[in-house]
Image (tube, grey):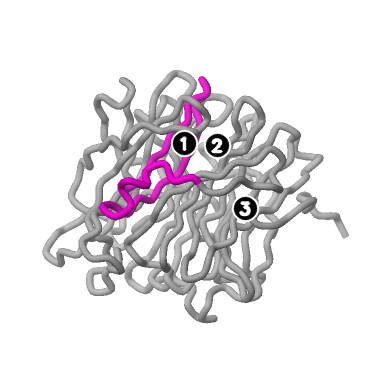
């Protein structure tokens, strides 16, 4: 029997949630000095409109600093959800959404409309490895609807800024939202103006998206993926992918990755391939899976696809595995980063029997590089 491609060499917690709170949305980047910087959100419970972004850091990936809140002064005004990324010149960026808090303890989700409380797209930047941050700047949304934007900003080698989001219904049942797309917004002037282009546009109007990501591969191509949902029956389509050969101006037609995953994330490899990490809640074994892919305009080019975190059950309620059941999920939003020693650091949120928070898994993959 062939040995596993990925070998776990260490695991533990980046952050253990304190009582009556949960943590979610963890993302890691590497500084020029080799320090690992990790962002995530803390909130009082899944679905509650009180996300607070925090930053922690580590020299070795085992011992982590106490959380720092970059925008603590806004925590009673806005619920802020976002991800960090790093440009090739060393700047760090935060991109995500902010939602006005009207009543403390309120939900940002409406079961009636299957929508998010209306929100704004925002970004910020840091020139000192995330120790201090600018204020949040608003990116105008080009179409009606709320924005679901868990993916990080992609800053390309030529200086373009790319962000993507999935349009969602709001709390207004009369608002018509074109949900069968993933919106790409691009700035080529450091955030002064933004151009709108659908990164995905699905032919079937009941096909919608979540957890969209865009990255730049080492050869300059852009790669986009998402979780593709069937609003008719709550099932999933295979995760789609698309490629841009011209810095986001045009995109290949959407194709299937051949993977039936849920929340996803991407990370580039130095040889033009990519890491595609995703949750698997609907097929046994449940957990987090990691794939090595070599995408082209013909197929996704899956080289490896292995389970790296085995979850005892897919959600707090065994049958609650569809997108609409997300407040019952017990793990999610995985992310992977390549470290200087060529190990891989995987982070994701989890709610386990004895503890919850942001878990990490350190992987070796000798055949990868």
Cα gap from disc 3 to disc 2, whole angstroms:
35 Å
Q: Residue at x 28, y 57 (%)?
A: 168
Q: Position of residue 290 (x, y in %)?
A: 65, 52
Mark 3 lies on a secondary structure that is: strand
User: Is residue 313 rendered to the left or right of residue 262?
Assistant: right
- The residue positioned farthest toward the left in the image shown: 174
Q: What residue did someone put label 1 on? A: 243
Relative depth, front residue between 182 and 279 = 279
Is residue 360 part of the magenta span, yes or no? Answer: no
Q: Are marks 2 and 1 in contact (CB under 8 Å)?
A: yes
Q: Which mark is residue 212?
A: none
Let me know if residue 200 appears in the view: no
Q: Are marks 1 and 3 in contact (CB under 8 Å)?
A: no
Q: Position of residue 27 (x, y in %)?
A: 53, 46
Dot 3 crowding, Cα within 10 Å, few <14, some 14–19, many 20+: many
Q: Which mark is residue 296?
A: 2
Q: What residue did someone put label 3 on? A: 14
Quarter of the rendering containing residue 323: bottom left
Dot 1 crowding, Cα within 10 Å, few <14, some 14–19, many 20+: many
**Quadrant (top left/top right/bottom left/bottom right) for the C terminus:** top right
**Quadrant (top left/top right/bottom left/bottom right) for the N terminus:** bottom right
Q: Which residues are magenta?
A: 68-97
């Amino acid at each position: 029997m062939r040995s596993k491609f990925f070998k776990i060499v260490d695991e533990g917690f980046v952050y253990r949630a304190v009582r009556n709170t949960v943590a979610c949305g963890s993302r890691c980047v590497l500084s020029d000095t080799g320090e690992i910087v990790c962002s995530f959100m803390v909130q009082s419970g899944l679905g509650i409109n009180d996300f607070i972004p925090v930053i922690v850091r580590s020299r070795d990936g085992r011992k982590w600093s106490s959380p720092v809140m970059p925008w603590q002064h806004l925590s009673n005004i806005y619920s802020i959800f976002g991800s960090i990324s790093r440009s090739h010149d060393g700047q760090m960026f935060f991109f995500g959404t902010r939602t006005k808090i009207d009543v403390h303890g309120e939900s940002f989700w409406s079961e009636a409309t299957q929508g998010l409380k209306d929100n704004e797209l925002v970004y910020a930047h840091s020139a000192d490895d995330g120790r201090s941050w600018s204020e949040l700047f608003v990116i105008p949304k080009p179409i009606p609807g709320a924005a679901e934007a868990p993916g990080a900003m992609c800053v390309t080698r030529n200086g373009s800024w790319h962000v993507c989001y999935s349009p969602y219904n709001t709390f207004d049942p009369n608002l018509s939202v074109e949900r069968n797309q993933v919106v790409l917004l691009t700035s080529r002037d450091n955030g002064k103006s933004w151009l709108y282009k659908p990164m995905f546009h699905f032919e079937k109007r009941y096909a919608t998206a979540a957890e969209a990501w865009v990255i730049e591969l080492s050869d300059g191509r852009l790669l986009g993926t998402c979780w593709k949902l069937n609003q008719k029956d709550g099932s999933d389509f295979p995760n789609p992918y698309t490629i841009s050969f011209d810095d986001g101006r045009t995109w290949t037609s959407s194709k299937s990755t051949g993977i039936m995953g849920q929340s996803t994330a991407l990370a580039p490899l130095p040889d033009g391939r990519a890491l595609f990490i995703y949750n698997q809640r609907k097929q046994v074994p449940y957990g987090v899976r990691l794939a090595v892919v070599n995408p082209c305009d013909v197929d996704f080019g899956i080289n490896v696809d292995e389970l790296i975190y085995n979850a005892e059950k897919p959600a707090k309620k065994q049958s609650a595995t569809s997108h609409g059941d997300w407040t019952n999920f017990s793990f999610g939003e995985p992310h992977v980063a390549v470290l200087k020693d060529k190990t891989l650091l995987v982070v994701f949120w989890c709610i386990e029997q004895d503890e919850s928070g942001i878990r990490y898994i350190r992987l070796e993959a000798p055949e990868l590089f």
